[in-house]
Image (spheres, rainbow, N blue to C red):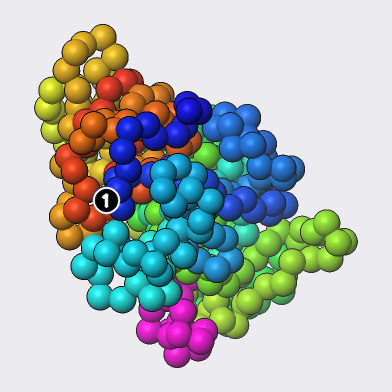
């Protein structure tokens, strides 16, 4: 048995590890391999799609009875593991990523569900949330405009190469949380290491890309007119960090980071390393959950079985799973919908 394989019995309600798809976008770095041992042969490695049933980057099951299959194929065969979601024929409604921004990402915007369904072949739109796992001292993000703008004003500033003066920049630090609804103009800045939870969509309309050249010597395409059709052009208040309240139990603490109609995200702090007590996760009976380890390591235990996990691991917990106990010292994001 390897350190990442389950022991004892398995069944289709038992948790399993996921292996991600990688993306080598030009703004990426090396931290996802260096810090999280992703072992993906890409340089740069900009993103890992940790829990994904999107056709542009499918996650693969890395432990248990489904090992080697894509998560999408498992859901097709065993839809009950997703729970009572009305339609998972096209996969899960959410997608979870790790993002290493060595350089600035493009200034971009995503459509909402209604626009995407009508204009993008029935696709979902994209509302997302960022959890900052690490940030350099001068790391920033773009969050909307400083003041109200018009489509013509943005076009003129783009033509003159001065659109950056319209964009609101916000300093970020480790442990910050940002909610990015569809229609919000935004960009992750250089020096940011981000966990992103989003709708299962890959629709991005680039508004501005700093005139960069890709590996083929060409500028990446922009989608200015589409972006202006869906963008919120009102001035945005500088985003404030939400009030967060830690709830303590034996061996653990947890806090709600974000709740919207698409997903719910909690941060869990596990510390049972020096005790015989074990933290406990009450799994949902009507929905899957996903655990993403952002720091530390530990062991999950349930119904006579166990699973080792490490920093960067992503664990899929099927609906109707047994209560899970955890031993170790770790921080995890728990995602449900």
Residue 133, placed above or below residue 217: above
Is residue 297 toward the left or the right of residue 263 in the image? right
Residue 195 coordinates in the image, percent (x, y) = 45, 45
Residue 76, placed above or below residue 314: below
Residue at 62%, 51% (x, y): give it.
22
Residue at 58%, 52% (x, y): give it.
21
Is residue 27 toward the left or the right of residue 322 in the image? right
Give yes or no for residue 152 being in the magenta stretch. no
Residue where numbered disc 1 is placed: 13
Q: Is residue 261 visible?
A: no
Residue 30, placed above or below residue 53: above
Q: Can residue 207 be seen in this view?
A: yes
Q: Quadrant of residue 266?
A: top left
Residue at 64%, 71% (x, y): give it.
157
- Foreground residue, 311 or 319? 319
Residue 155 coordinates in the image, percent (x, y) = 63, 78
Q: Residue furthest front?
A: 9
- Foreground residue, 150 or 231? 231
Q: Which residue lies furthest to the bottom in this view?
A: 118
Query: Circle 1: is it few (<14), some (14-19), or many (20+) Cα within 10 Å?
Result: some
Residue 136 coordinates in the image, percent (x, y) = 55, 32
Give yes or no for residue 112 being in the magenta stretch. yes
Residue at 40%, 69% (x, y): give it.
76
Range of residues picked out in magenta: 110-126
Residue 110, placed above or below residue 173: below
Q: Which residue lies furthest to the top in this view?
A: 274
Q: How many marks?
A: 1
- Foreground residue, 144 or 188? 188
Tag 1 secondary structure = loop
Q: Quadrant of residue 88?
A: bottom left
Quadrant holding the C terminus: bottom left
């Amino acid at each position: 048995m390897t350190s990442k394989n389950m022991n004892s019995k398995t069944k289709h309600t038992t948790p399993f590890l996921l292996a991600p798809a990688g993306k080598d976008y030009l703004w990426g770095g090396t931290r996802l391999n260096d810090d999280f041992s992703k072992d993906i042969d890409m340089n740069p490695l900009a993103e890992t799609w940790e829990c994904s049933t999107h056709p542009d980057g499918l996650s693969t099951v890395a432990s248990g009875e489904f090992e080697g299959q894509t998560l999408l194929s498992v859901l097709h065969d065993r839809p009950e593991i997703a729970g009572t979601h009305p339609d998972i024929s096209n996969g899960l409604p959410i997608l979870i990523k790790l993002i290493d921004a060595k350089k600035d990402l493009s200034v971009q915007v995503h459509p909402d569900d209604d626009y995407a369904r009508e204009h993008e072949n029935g696709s979902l739109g994209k509302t997302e949330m960022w959890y900052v796992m690490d940030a350099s001292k001068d790391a920033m993000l773009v969050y909307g405009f400083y003041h109200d703008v018009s489509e013509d004003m943005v076009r003129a500033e783009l033509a003159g190469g001065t659109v950056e003066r319209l964009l609101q920049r916000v300093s970020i630090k480790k442990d910050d949380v940002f909610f990015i609804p569809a229609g919000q103009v935004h960009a992750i800045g250089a020096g940011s290491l981000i966990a992103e939870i989003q709708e299962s969509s890959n629709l991005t309309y680039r508004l501005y890309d700093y005139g960069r050249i890709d590996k083929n010597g060409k500028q990446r395409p922009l989608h200015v007119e589409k972006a202006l059709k869906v963008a919120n052009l009102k001035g945005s208040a500088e985003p404030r960090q939400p009030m967060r309240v830690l709830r303590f139990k034996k061996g653990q603490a947890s806090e709600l980071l974000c709740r919207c109609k698409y997903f719910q995200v909690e941060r869990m702090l596990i510390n049972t390393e020096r005790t015989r007590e074990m933290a406990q996760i009450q799994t949902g009976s009507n929905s899957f959950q996903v655990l993403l380890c952002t720091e530390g390591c530990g062991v999950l235990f349930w119904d006579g079985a166990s699973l080792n996990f490490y920093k960067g691991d992503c664990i899929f917990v099927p609906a109707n799973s047994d209560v899970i106990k955890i031993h170790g010292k770790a921080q995890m994001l728990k995602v449900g919908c």
